[in-house]
Image (tube, grey):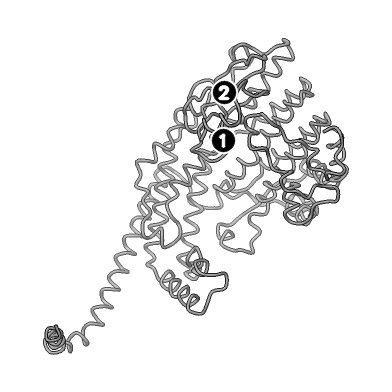
């Protein structure tokens, strides 16, 4: 064995022409490196030019300013008002559960987190949130009405801020100009309005619950108006903005459910509520795709010109310990060193992939027909969305799954909005005729179709005479109106509206059926 090893070493030393290798080797390596960068940059530039030519053929603008709202005077902007700064600094303006987690819970509120969690079977309507549990056990009143009044007293500042918001939106505009590069700056205020929209909508939902228990439907309707102001805000219609709109719209649906279940709304108030739920979440979804396409293009151009921003998405220290050691920091810096020296063509390829995908999505959506809206996921399946090395290195991976899920959430939120508008029509019919209709065809206005089936919503009357209304839901399967669990897009069950539980269906049976 040793003899063969010595022979191998002798051959390496005496037979390999080391002198020409040492002389020409570095030059060949440099030449290959230059050729690699030239070829990759050419391929990337060619792919981007081809993608941009497609946008020109379809007359889509790639100028970010065409998707950014026009500038307005500071005195007309809500973001520049003192109320907005008061809202940001208010420690008692939040959901009660969140205030408790932050240690800002007011005196008199329960300190037990379990008292604020929604019942697991709430979608089944076998239990409801009891406002009395939100108060300290020693001071819990006998009725929920007294609990709502006490909570209003404790949270008076929160109610005052909401009232001031409603008044300010009559004169101030919810408006924010954003540059794509602002999202790369951790100190940027680019998400200020969007984050306040999520925060305010959750508080509006909780406050409307208190109002409905006290029979103050006008106050609950004013909270829907506040949410609508955020839905109509003038901001770039990026994917993030669309997802936030879904959250705000869900808050409006929950407020509507509180109003309907209270049974205290007049016909005029129900009609006003139906008008307030008139904002569509997918009518301008083509603008979301266009804005997202231009946004990614601008980000790619910024990364190409500022290579220091190209770093690993997750710090290597997260794989080891909160406090990285010296060798871990060197490893991180070494990886970032190579990230920042990738060919420019890879960044161009990432931008081209994103443009191609969004153009396919725009071609697949027909906003004049329901079938076209449903075809969006199927149309984009024709595109090769495998994450290229260029996309992975830049962190701008294929948006295939993200866009599919976002559009599905928008469809679900839009379906729930139509469900609640139909539920309002059912209540208006009951107030006029004394009973619910036997069929949706008896309603004065034909309800919208189900996005997930292309047909009318399923509807039937329960033995107690109350309505049972449902959509097939994201799985596009009819589960006979069995409410789905709120655990993701793959959950079984339907999107359901009903006033009373399904007779004989226990929580155990429901969870087993929708697992």
The residue pinned by badge 1 equals: 485
Within 10 angstroms of label 1, few (less than 14), some, or many (20 or more) residues?
A: many
Q: Quadrant of residue 282?
A: top right
State which tag comes first along the sequence, 1 or 2.
2
Q: Is residue 109 above or below residue 228?
A: below
Secondary structure found at label 2: loop
Q: Which quadrant of the rendered structure holds the N terminus?
A: bottom left
Q: In the rendered view, does 509 fall on the left or right side of 106?
A: left
CA distance separating discs 1 and 2: 24 Å
Q: At 41% across and 72% down in the image, what residue appears?
A: 338
Q: At 38% across and 60% down in the image, what residue appears?
A: 390
Front residue of 250 and 242? 250
The residue pinned by badge 2 equals: 448
Q: In the rendered view, does 54 fall on the left or right side of 124?
A: left
Q: In the rendered view, does 218 fall on the left or right side of 40?
A: right
Residue 403 x/y as whole percent: 48, 44
**Marks 1,2: beta carbons within 8 A:** no
Residue 306 x/y as whole percent: 49, 68
Q: In the rendered view, does 381 fall on the left or right side of 402?
A: left
Q: Is residue 310 above or below residue 381?
A: below
């Amino acid at each position: 064995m040793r003899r063969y090893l010595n022979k191998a070493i002798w051959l390496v030393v005496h037979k390999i022409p080391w002198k020409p290798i040492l002389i020409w080797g570095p030059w060949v390596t440099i030449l290959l490196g230059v050729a690699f960068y030239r070829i990759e940059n050419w391929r990337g530039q060619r792919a981007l030019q081809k993608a941009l030519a497609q946008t020109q053929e379809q007359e889509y603008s790639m100028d970010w300013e065409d998707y950014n709202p026009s500038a307005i005077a500071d005195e007309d902007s809500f973001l520049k008002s003192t109320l907005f700064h008061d809202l940001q600094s208010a420690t008692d303006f939040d959901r009660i559960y969140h205030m408790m987690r932050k240690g800002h819970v007011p005196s008199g509120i329960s300190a037990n987190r379990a008292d604020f969690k929604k019942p697991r079977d709430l979608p089944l309507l076998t239990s409801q949130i009891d406002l009395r549990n939100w108060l300290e056990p020693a001071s819990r009143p006998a009725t929920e009405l007294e609990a709502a009044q006490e909570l209003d007293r404790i949270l008076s500042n929160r109610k005052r801020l909401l009232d001031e918001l409603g008044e300010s939106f009559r004169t101030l505009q919810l408006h924010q100009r954003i540059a794509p590069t602002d999202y790369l700056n951790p100190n940027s205020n680019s998400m200020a309005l969007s984050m306040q929209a999520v925060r305010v909508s959750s508080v509006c939902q909780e406050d409307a619950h208190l109002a409905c228990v006290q029979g103050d439907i006008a106050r609950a309707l004013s909270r829907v108006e506040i949410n609508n102001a955020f839905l109509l805000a003038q901001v770039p219609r990026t994917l993030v903005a669309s997802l936030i709109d879904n959250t705000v719209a869900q808050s409006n649906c929950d407020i509507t459910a509180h109003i309907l279940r209270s049974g205290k709304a007049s016909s005029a108030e129900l009609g006003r509520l139906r008008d307030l739920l008139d904002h569509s979440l997918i009518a301008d979804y083509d603008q979301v795709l266009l804005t997202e396409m231009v946004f990614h293009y601008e980000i790619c151009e910024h990364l190409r010109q500022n290579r220091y921003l190209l770093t690993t998405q997750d710090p290597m220290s997260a794989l080891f310990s909160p406090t990285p050691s010296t060798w871990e920091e060197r490893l991180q810096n070494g990886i970032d060193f190579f990230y920042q020296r990738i060919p420019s063509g890879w960044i161009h390829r990432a931008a081209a992939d994103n443009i191609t995908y969004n153009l396919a999505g725009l071609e697949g959506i027909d906003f004049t027909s329901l079938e076209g809206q449903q075809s969006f996921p199927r149309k984009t399946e024709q595109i090769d969305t495998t994450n290229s090395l260029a996309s992975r290195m830049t962190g701008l991976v294929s948006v295939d799954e993200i866009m599919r899920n976002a559009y599905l959430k928008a469809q679900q939120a839009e379906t729930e909005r139509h469900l609640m508008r139909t539920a309002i029509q059912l209540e208006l019919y009951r107030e006029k005729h004394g009973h619910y209709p036997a069929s949706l065809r008896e309603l004065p206005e034909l309800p919208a179709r189900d996005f997930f089936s292309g047909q009318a919503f399923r509807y039937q009357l329960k033995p107690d005479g109350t309505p049972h209304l449902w959509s097939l839901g994201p799985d596009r399967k009819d589960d006979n109106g069995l409410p789905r669990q709120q655990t993701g897009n793959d959950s079984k069950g339907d999107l359901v509206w009903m006033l009373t539980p399904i007779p004989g269906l226990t929580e155990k049976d429901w969870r087993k059926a929708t697992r």
